Image (tube, helix red, strand yellow):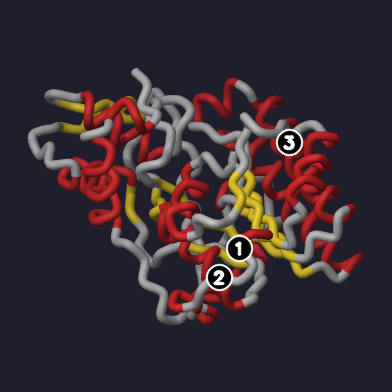
Amino acid sequence: MGKDKNTKNTKTILVTGGTGLVGKHLKDILPSAIYVGSQDYDLTKIDEVYNMIDTHKPNTIIHLAARVGGILDNVKYPVDYLEENVLMNTNVLKACHKYNVKNVIAILSTCIYPDKVDVYPMKEKDMFNGPPTPSNFSYGLAKRTMASQIDSYIKQYDKKWCYLIPCNLYGEYDKYTEHNSHFVAALIKKIHDATNKILLWGTGKPLRQFIYGGDLARVIKYMINDGIYKNMNVAPPWVYSIDEMANIAIKACDKNNLEIEYDISKPDGQYRKDVESDIFNNTFPKFEFTTLKNGIKMTYNKIKGNYPLFRINK
């Protein structure tokens, strides 16, 4: 595995979404790459994407940029989630082809998978066995479309491109808001702000996997180091109910006095979306994931002393 190697040609690696959760984790371990965000280029505009690639002339692109948010935001703005993500993904891939970018690693999400399948955990081949869950339908469909686009470029043009499908991400570089962040970040904000109890949506029964952003960043770096470009799920083996996960988070944040209440009038979201990572495990058999407890503890310890600096908004 590539952890002891110096990443080659880092000056020609361009990272979109470089100011986001995974982008900042990647910058911690791959500082010489070029990191761009929405303040630099509007990826929904093809001319700006062409300009971005023509300016920096990368031979490798890590495509992290996406519009992301929680269930409420996804349900409220389905057109925006679909159109913005499809436009960004289409433009980036089209520009990579036009300018002969050799390697592309795109980050998807387990939201691409069907709402329900017959057998769990889900495998990569299950992607098209049903529609995405209604609560994240537009986002999931946009990401699923990018998977098809990359597969099509590989088939038609023999590209050395690939996509990774990580489970639920978290880490200190997330947005800490209730509506626009990933689940763990929103939960940490609730825990930080609470004095007696926290209120969570649904029943607490849905099952999830969680991956620390720094772990996904390490995977990306190892793939670049070793020249590995495979489509694969990336998820730790541990599966938790929302209730189990919330209790772990409360303890990791040293707020053991908090109680959890559930608003069962609100949706649970997809009941189960755990995935099998056999391709990943066979590719990187010695990879060690950060445990959920340790990852949340690291995350909270880093943000609580720098509360305004880590994009936490009341």
Residue type (three-letter) at the residue carrying disc 3: Leu
In front: mark 2 or mark 3?
2
Q: Position of residue 239 (x, y in %)?
A: 36, 59
Hey, which quadrant is residue 47 in on the image?
top right
Tag on residue 43? 3
Residue 243 lies left or right of residue 222; in this view the side is left
Q: Are marks 2 and 3 in contact (CB under 8 Å)?
A: no
Residue that label 1 marks? 10
Residue type (three-letter) at the residue carrying disc 1: Thr
Q: Residue at x 50, y 59 (%)?
A: 30
Q: CA distance from mark 2 to mark 1?
A: 6 Å
Element type where label 1 sits in the image: helix
Local packing at callout 3 (Cα closer than 10 Å; few below 14, some 14-19, many 20+) is many
Q: Residue at x 84, y 36 (%)?
A: 46
Local packing at callout 2 (Cα closer than 10 Å; few below 14, some 14-19, many 20+) is many
In the rendered image, the residue lying farthest to the top is 314
Tag on residue 180? none
Element type where label 2 sits in the image: loop
Residue type (three-letter) at the residue carrying disc 2: Thr
Residue that label 2 marks? 7
Element type where label 3 sits in the image: loop
Q: CA distance from mark 2 to mark 3?
A: 26 Å
Viewer-proximal residue, 272 or 112?
112
Viewer-proximal residue, 299 or 147?
299
Residue 34 lies left or right of residue 59; in this view the side is left
